[in-house]
Image: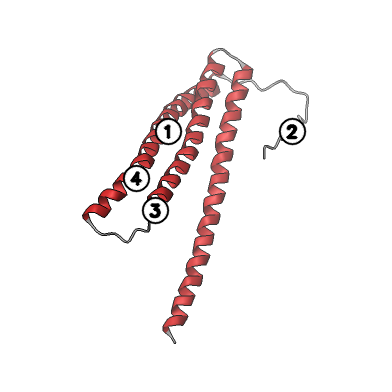
Amino acid sequence: METNETFEQTSPGPALVLNFEAQSYLREAGKWAVFLGILGFIGTGLILICALFVSTIFALIAQYQPTPYPAGISGIVSFVYVLIAVFNFFFALYLYQFGSRIKKGILFNDAMETNKALEKLKSFFKLWGITTIVILALYALMIIIFIIVGVGAASMMHR
């Protein structure tokens, strides 16, 4: 699903050079990206811990209060938590990799490391965009289902 876009330079001018201000912005963005990446890893761990203990929580709830939960719901909820943790891990990983590489690239004036950092930033935004499209599609699907169910329920009331 990876697309390679090539851009041709219209005039044979000098290569892109980042001035001190641009480097400063990238260095600061790198610090924040590392910080947010680490928080993302911690969040992923907490989500995985919740996934492990959700069946215990459901069992405790059922012990003190009869619940209408169908059998196996805790397994489904655990799976959803693990799925969320996997997505969260990749968001955190791409941010962390961008942050650590851009800081190294700017510090050592290394164009290859800076390019790798920007590639990770591109991957982060690509994942964010695909996830947003999927969520919007799920919202649209849910709205359509709710409308169909609502129309069906309304037509049953008039009989």
Give how far apart the Cα atoms at labels 2 and 4 are.
48 Å
The residue mark sitting in front, 2 or 4, is: 4
Task: Point out residue 5 in the picture as x, y percentages from the top left corner.
Answer: 72, 35
The amino acid type of the residue labelled 1 equals: Gly
Task: Tell me the mark number nearer the camera, choosing from 1 and 2.
Answer: 1
The residue where tag 4 is placed is 54
Confirm or deny contact between disc 1 and disc 4 (CB under 8 A). no
Circle 1 or circle 3, nearest the eye: 3
Q: Going from the N terminus, do you reach mark 2 or mark 3 first?
A: 2
Residue underneath mark 2: 6
Q: Is residue 43 left or right of residue 17?
A: left
Q: CA distance from mark 1 to mark 4?
A: 21 Å
Residue type at mark 4?
A: Val
Q: What residue is shown at x 29% (from left), y 49% (from top)?
A: 59
Residue 129 percent location from the top left of the image = 56, 44
Mark toward the start of the polypeptide (3 vs 4): 4
Res. 118 image quadrant: top right
**10 Å crowding of disc 1: few (<14), some (14-19), many (20+):** many
Looking at the picture, the colour scheme in use is secondary structure
Q: CA–CA distance between discs 1 and 3?
A: 27 Å
Quadrant that contains the C terminus: bottom left
In space, the residues marked 3 and 4 are separated at their CA atoms by 10 Å
- The residue where tag 3 is placed is 73
Residue 119 image offset from top left, x and y in percent: 61, 29
- In this figure, which residue is indicated by the disc labeled 1? 40
Report if the CB atoms under discs 2 and 4 are less than 8 Å apart: no
Q: Earlier in the sequence, mark 2 or mark 4?
A: 2
Q: Earlier in the sequence, mark 1 or mark 2?
A: 2
Q: Earlier in the sequence, mark 1 or mark 4?
A: 1
Where is residue 9? Give x, y as percent: 76, 29
